[in-house]
Image (tube, rainbow, N blue to C red):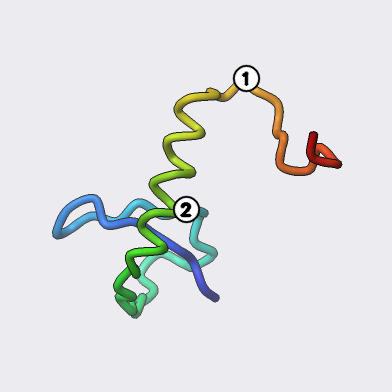
Amino acid sequence: MQIQAEIEDSTHLKLRQPLDAKVGSVIILEIIEPSERDEFASGSAALLERAYGEGEPDYSEAGEPI
């Protein structure tokens, strides 16, 4: 099972989806350092989400470019 998470502080993670694990299960983490390109892409996506908001339709699969 692979689940992505963001570090909120030195003792807390914010999971991107729920864990399918029993209480008391042992979880092993692997830290992958983001590349500069990854940071740019995720920052750009976050700014677009903030600019268009939740009520905006998803244009990613809208069809042919203008």
Instruction: Tell whether 47 sits left or right of 29.
Output: right
SS for tag 2?
A: loop
**On the picture, is 12 further left or further right than 17?**
left
- First in sequence, mark 2 or 1: give its number: 2
Percent of width and height locating residue 13: 29, 56
Give the secondary structure at mark 1: loop
Q: Nearer the viewer, residue 59 or 20?
A: 59
Crowd band around label 1 with a 10 angstrom C-alpha radius: few (<14), some (14–19), many (20+): few
Q: CA distance from mark 2 to mark 1?
A: 21 Å
Q: Height in image: 57 above or below 25?
A: above
Name the image quarter holding residue 64: top right
Residue in the image at 70% along x and 26% along y: 57
Residue beneath disc 2: 16
Question: Which of pointers 2 and 1 indicates the residue nearer the eye?
Answer: 1
The amino acid type of the residue labelled 2 equals Arg
Of all residues, the one furthest to the top in this rendering is 55
Q: Residues within 10 Å of mark 2 (few under 14, many from 20)?
A: few
Indicate the amino acid at tag 1: Gly
What residue is rendered at 79% in x and 40% in y? 65
Q: Residue furthest front?
A: 66
Location of residue 58 in the rendering, given as x and y in whole percent from the top left corner: 70, 33
Instruction: Residue at 40%, 63% (x, y): give it.
Output: 37
Residue of label 1: 55
Vertical relation: 17 (above or below) 53: below
